[in-house]
Amino acid sequence: MSDSDASEITQALQDWNDGKDDAQARLLPYVYEELKRQARYLMSRERSNHTLQPTALVHEAFLRLAKQTGVDWQNRSHFFGISSRLMRQILVDHARTHSAAKRGSNPIHYSLEDVDIPVEQRAESIIAMNEALDHLERIDEQQAKVVEMRFFGGLSNAEIAEALDISERTVLRELKVAKLWLFRELNK
């Protein structure tokens, strides 16, 4: 992303904060491809005729973003962090809709790196991961955000570091600790 694009995003977000009507429309062309990249990352191994496609995920996320009120958009990293959160919620909602069995009746097979399982097969795991992340957030908000941005947003360590204003080393450390905690939590 060029410096001029980054400044255009920042300006559009500032205009959105100021309530300018055209801000969202000006923002979309600059963020659409990154949102689509995040969605493709999440949906990379889904079957081709799946009801939830990356484009639909992006559109749903942007519609939910557009409805946000009271958000003080700080910069593009802040925007993409919130986008990750919304994509997480959309996937969780989708998983709940498609989950046939209740949690606990089947073992949970889940890995932070494993997004190859179709949503229908990993619905319980997504729901369990969402609950575990909610629990982790109460214990360590930063670790939960790092995991959320990685798994649901597909952000790199550098992007996560920028969004949270921490070092990449801290991102790596937080991921390592959070993975251990999540592994224990999901395998109780």
Image: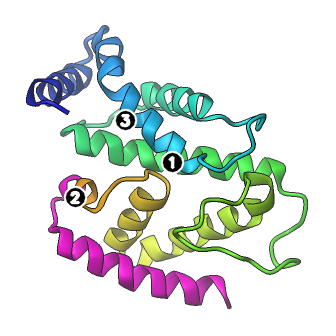
* Mark 2 or mark 3, earlier in chain: 3
Q: Earlier in the sequence, mark 3 or mark 1?
A: 3
Residue 23 in the image: x percent, y percent? Answer: 28, 15
- Residue 41 badge: 1
Task: Find the distance from the CA under tag 2 to the CA under tag 3.
Answer: 15 Å
* Residue 133 pos. (x, y %): 52, 69
- Report if residue 169 lies within the magenta region: yes
| SS at circle 3 | helix
Residue 25 shows which numbered tag? none
How many C-alpha atoms fall within 10 Å of the one at disc 2: few (<14), some, or many (≥20)?
few
Residue highlighted by disc 3: 34
Question: Magenta region, mostly helix, strand or loop?
Answer: helix
Which quadrant would the N terminus be assigned to in this image? top left
Which region shows up in magenta? 162-188
The residue beneath circle 2 is 158
Q: For the residue marked with disc 1, what is the amino acid?
A: Tyr
Is residue 60 located in the magenta-colored stretch of the structure? no
Dot 1: few (<14), some (14–19), or many (≥20) neighbours within 10 Å? some
Residue 170 x %, y %: 21, 75
Q: The disc labelled 2 sits on which kind of residue?
A: Ala
Q: Is residue 67 above or below residue 96?
A: above
Rendered residue at 47%/26% (across/down):
67
What's the colour scheme? rainbow
Looking at the image, residue 171 sits to the left or right of residue 35; the answer is left
Horizontal side of residue 152 vs 77, given as left or right = right
Which percent across, then down, holds residue 51?
76, 35
Q: Label 1's element?
A: helix
**Figure disc tally:** 3
| Picture quadrant of residue 56 | top right
